[in-house]
Image (cartoon, grey):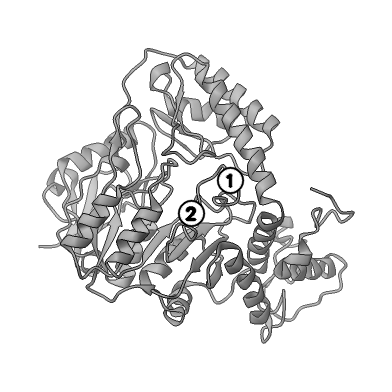
Amino acid sequence: MTLTDDPRDPLGLRADAPMLAAWLEFTRLAEAGRLRPMSVPGHKQRQDLVGSVVAGDAPFYGGLDSIKHADFLRTDAEARAARLWGADWCRFSVAGSTHGNQALALAVGRPGQEVIINRTLHKSLLMGLVLAGLRPVWVRPEIDPRSGLPAGVAVQAVRDALTAHPDACGVFLGDPTYVGTISDLAGHAAAAHGAGVPLLVDAAWAAHLGFHPGLPPHAMAAGADAMVTSAHKALPAYTQGALVLARTERVGAARLDRAFEATHTTSPTGSIMASIDAARALLAAHGEQLCDRLLRGVAAARKRLMEVPGLAVLDGDGVEPTKLVVLLAGTGAHGIAVEADLVAAGMPVEMADRDTLIPIPTIADDEEHLAAFIETLIDVVERHRGTPRDPSAAASWTVEPDTVLAPREAFFATAETVSASAAAGRVSAELIAPYPPGVPVLAPGELITAAAIDALRAVAADGGRIAYAADPSLTTFQVIAR
């Protein structure tokens, strides 16, 4: 990669990134004191009020371009992304893959229709079902007994679901999974298309896939009709940056536009939009080189970790090769304690539970940084080494849902609060998920079981975060009133 003399654009991406070019010009004028806006945002580019926290903030409409003309800039940038991923429709979201998933839920089917969907889904997908009024037909992955983690969803499971539910409006899968396991997306696309419905993929963690021969193809290349991916997870965009991409043969462009706009802000920040554009331009120009470095770094990290007695990593043909999932059970170390020490060392990781630790290497990580992290991780594990144990599958992966009411019906039903002891056997009015990974253990409309309550309590007792519950202490639950 050749560096330019411009420290604000060291790789010269602005030539292929119209939103980035506009943001660079806006912030240049702001830094030079040549902007005196009489429009929002209210900080007016001043940093003497709330400080430098607003540095670089630029509205998309009225900042990167005039309110009347900014959409020309947007459609140019989004068209470039569509071409890169082989789509014919693309939108940039400043509300993350959460918004993208909900937009796709609104773009397929009609209220009351069924959709085939995997149960190890992110909570945003389930709330998308609430918004769209779709009824889930769950398919579940196999759980690997050696790690307690989910594999990809089998194609036959989706075929069987489509056969049993011929009026389903689509297939919605999360792939790769949170732990990096992958499905046969080409097979899933063939199964969905054979049934006359689209395949929609939550690929939040996979914006880099398809840009190196050592990586699996991205979902669009594998035949998916639509894909959501985060520009801020695997790519170096601002937090909340995401892309929604589609081919419009089975999901119409006009419906996609309406669905996207339904829950997106009318005031997107130009800094996030420009960072998505810049990340796309970086991937187009240097993606293979950066992914090659990432693949080498993760391969070396896996090799080094496997040299440590008791440590293991999730590996093999069914695992995305840049994912790093560390399995701790054989060392006896507790993942929450390991995580705490890594945070203290200035190296926070994405996720930790008792048996599993998940750092997130990206194309921003060079091999030296990854190697240094791995040595710190090994030192921490050695400090916490204990008696080896068998891994146990986390609540997020083992939930057996019993859907009594459609998610939308349950969401709007009258709810009441009951004690935990009285909750088993009632229908949940709320969504409760350990976070991360954000996979619901209970969702609106599902029967609450003693096993689900015990599983959630075990997560809390182990130091995990219980998210979205009205009562995170799990003393009470919100249930559908009788």
Residue in the foreground of this view, choosing between 466 and 419:
466
Query: Nearer the N terminus, badge 2 or badge 1?
Result: 2
Which residue is at the far right? 5
Residue type at mark 2?
Ala
Which residue carries the number 1 mark?
Answer: 213
Please say if 65 is above or below 246.
Answer: below
Residue 307: mark: none
Q: Which residue is drawn at 67% across and 45% down?
A: 290
Task: Name the residue nearer the viewer: 96 or 289.
Answer: 289
Q: Which disc number belongs to residue 204?
A: 2
Q: Residues within 10 Å of mark 1 (few under 14, many from 20)?
A: few
Q: Find the residue positioned furthest to the bottom.
A: 68
Q: Which dot, 2 or 1, sits closer to the camera?
A: 1
Q: In this view, does 324 lie above or below 289?
A: above
Residue 139 horizontal/vertical position (percent) = 25, 52
Q: How far apart are marks 2 and 1 (CA)?
A: 20 Å
Question: Vertically, is 299 above or below 170?
Answer: above
Task: Answer left or right for 39 relative to 226.
Answer: right
On the picture, is 26 further left or further right than 469?
right
Q: Quadrant of residue 455?
A: top left
Say left or right for 462 vs 342: left
Q: Is residue 174 visible?
A: no
Amino acid marked by disc 1: Pro
Say if mark 2 contacts mark 1, CB within 8 Å.
no
Label 2 neighbour load within 10 Å: few <14, some 14-19, many 20+: many
Left or right: 288, with 178 as reference point: right
For mark 2, give the secondary structure: loop
**Which image quarter is the C terminus in?**
bottom left
Q: Position of residue 149 (x, y in %)?
A: 35, 36
Q: Is mark 1 on a helix, strand or loop?
A: loop
Q: Which residue is drawn at 60% across and 51% down?
A: 211
